[in-house]
Image (cartoon, coloured by chain):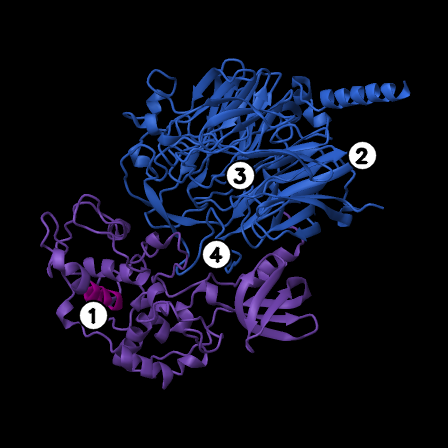
Chain colours: A purple, B blue
Amino acid sequence: MKPATGLTQAFRRLVKSPTTWSFGGRAIGCAGFALLVFCGFARGQNPAPGPEDSTPNYGGYAKADIAYGAQLYTAQCSGCHGVNGDAQPGINFRAGQFKRVASDNDLRMVITNGISGTAMPAWHFNNAELTSVVAYLRNMSKFNASNVVPGDAAHGKALYDSVGQCATCHRINGAGPFTGPDLTNVGAARSPDFLERTLLDADGAMLPNNRSIRAVTKANQTITGRRLNEDTYTVQLIDSNNRLVSLNKSDLREYTVLKTSGMPSYRDKLSSKDVSDLVAYLLSLKGGQ
Amino acid sequence: MIRRFLIAAAALLLVALNIRAQVSNEDLLHASSQPRDWLTYSGSYMSQRYSLLHQIDPANVKNLELKWVFQAQSLQKFEATPLVVHGVMYVTQAPNDVVALDAATGRAFWFYHYAVSPAAKPCCGAVNRGLAMLGHTLYMATNDSHLVALDSRNGQPIWNVEVAKAADGYAMTVAPLIIKDKVITGVAGGELGIRGFVAAYDVETGKEDWRFYTTAGPGDPGSGTWTSDAWAHGGAPIWTTGSYDPDLNLTYWGTGNPGPDYDPGARPGDNLYSASVVALDADTGKMKWYFQFSPNDAHDYDATQVPVLANTNWKGSPRKLMLWANRNGYFYVLDRTDGKFLSGTPFVRITWATGLDPQTGRPQLRHLEPGVPVFPGPEGATNWYSPSFSPHTGLFYIPAWSDFSAIFNRFPVPYKQGQHYTGGAITPAIPNGQMPVLSKLGPINTYTDAAGHGAVIAMDPADGQKKWEFDMYDVTMSGILTTASDLLFVGGREGYFQSLDAKTGALLWKASLGGEIADGPMTYEVNGKQYVSVASGNSLFVFGLRDP
């Protein structure tokens, strides 16, 4: 096999790192709307160590998601299904007894679409909520919902603005810089577990589509920024000065898609309660309406 | 007197032009040696998408310029390949409008609107891939499963017959094929529990002459490859145009996935004749042979590729070959007289099989745990996008999705009339990542390498080896055209229209057209000038050399 000597090949080699891409593992990050229903279905197969590994084994589901799901379940589902999940004939969530579903995907489908001809309505849960409700349904027997202490979103917002210094890079509802991802809708798009892991290990949790790039032109100018779009011949980014920049790959000497995030780890900066509060605030960001 | 003579002469000339502007069976048989016109979807019965035109060549291709644009009033993908007959271009506007254009200027002669029934349920976009033509008649297969004949001179309908019931999930997107006095088409709907078939209709009346069902029912040969009545909704649709060997009088059609797509447990057995190529007697529709690429397919590996025919040497002696890069990731060489498997080699990364049986070509399945990514993913290693074979370079060019994978999740579904019947769902293989899907979701691409990428892969049929590969960043649904001057034309989802050196894969020229290219480029000649057409986004772009 003789590869073509094209730009693309050269750049593909440049872009390809010696190790395979690796991310935090299991959290969902499906931003695409078409696949939303199915996103996160495969979770649980590759559990990454959570912040509190001494907690019981939740079958690969994250404690933060289960806790958020427990709150949602109590508020939205327990009216018909009961706090113990056994109020409907033939269904017992704690016992893993269902009438129509086997996989997590089935659960998501049933919750999203409802069941026509029954009292089960279609729920307009966002992706984070859906993931969390499923995580709780799968762990009702192990997880004590009454122990859930909901995070303090107001305190979380204070942390965001003060010690967290989050607004140094992130933007919400039109305010803030463009360096990091816009968080206006993050509470709808990302699960609590994902948010928690991002706060503790941003490099590990960073989504591929938020990667930064570093380019060096043939004139030895170094350009860094967040990648916005890329094709065979060009790349578009927003640089560290919030400028939109478009580069021809043929003008570059080096081009790297970075696997490290500029975001610090808050593992030693915030207590676990602070993290929980900050996550509660982020979960409240659902599109700015 | 002179005036009267001039009028008579002009009338004669008009008649002469009119007579020329039609297509005979003889023309169709010799389409590849008449490269000024483009008479069938794939350019000829051999379906090589190879043109003898050579005015545009590697030295002057940099002088290509835009000659005209046809802006379709449609937001559906432009997947149609135009026909060009003596300076007139006939092309469909998705889903089922037809326009006749001056092929040199793009000005329209007439426009025909076809109102598709709201019952139509094309699974994956209300698209159409083009027309067939014989005499002064154009033939179009519609999304609501009608076959329509139009007068090429004014766009008026001549006849319209229902091929299948749209409400049952049958749709048609394929460009029909004319063989002798028949127009041949097939039905899509492999995601909606149809029973696929190829059928031939009388070109004059639209009366059905023969029908070949692509799932074997009780009493049919191969019926033992289905259990219970799964064949009745077993899919095996037809949605790319077949090929024809006049010497053998065989017409070849690739069949799609068995249904439900992702749940092979619902249909134990090989599920003949899904994911296969069938060789049918062109006069009777009787099957002469078949070759099944993916028995009991679990991954939507449709064999809906264009069967490319080549007459070339095989191991030192001339042989009638069929070249086939399959959605399942293997590149096959078959003997098209009897369907004998000659070779099969992977052209992208494959994990669903460990290899092919060297004698029969049957895949040796790899056991994969649920939840493990499968290469290639559901869109496959390639799909309906036309490949090309250049007899001049001897290479076969594949529009490919390379290093593409996904997780296939099964869940059983009951059949319901006209409803989706896929038996599963697809999730991205990349943790936190995006996956290229059937339709482009917008102008942004932030895929990583792990998402896979588009490519043109040049394979040598003689040894099954890859000679070169041209990688794109995004995936591609573009067909490929090659010419006698060893140029290769190809687009991609990024909207670049590129010309490569067919011998080496080197980039020679490109134009950014701004929309996904999802049709096959084609070429033709008017008044001594060669043109190349390609659709990008919702418009058709035509290029030619800069005037001196």
Q: Nearer the viewer, mark 3 or mark 1?
A: 3
Label disc, if present, on residue B119 of the rendered structure: none
Label 2 secondary element: loop
Residue B258 % position (x, y) = 38, 32
Question: In the picture provided, is B371 more to the left or to the right than B405?
Answer: left
Amino acid type indicated by mark 4: Ala
- Examine the rendering and report whether any part of residue B99 can be seen: yes
Query: Which one is nearer the viewer's eye here, B543 or A200?
Result: B543
Label disc, if present, on residue B450 of the rendered structure: 4
Q: Nearer the viewer, mark 2 or mark 4?
A: 2
Residue drawn at 55 percent across, 44 percent down = B477
Q: How many marks?
A: 4
Using the numbered discs, state the Cα–Cα distance from disc 3 to disc 1 in whole angstroms: 57 Å
A27 relative to B380, above or below: below
Label disc, if present, on residue B94 of the rendered structure: 3
Q: Which residues are magenta?
A: A64-72
Q: Which residue is mark 1?
A: A55
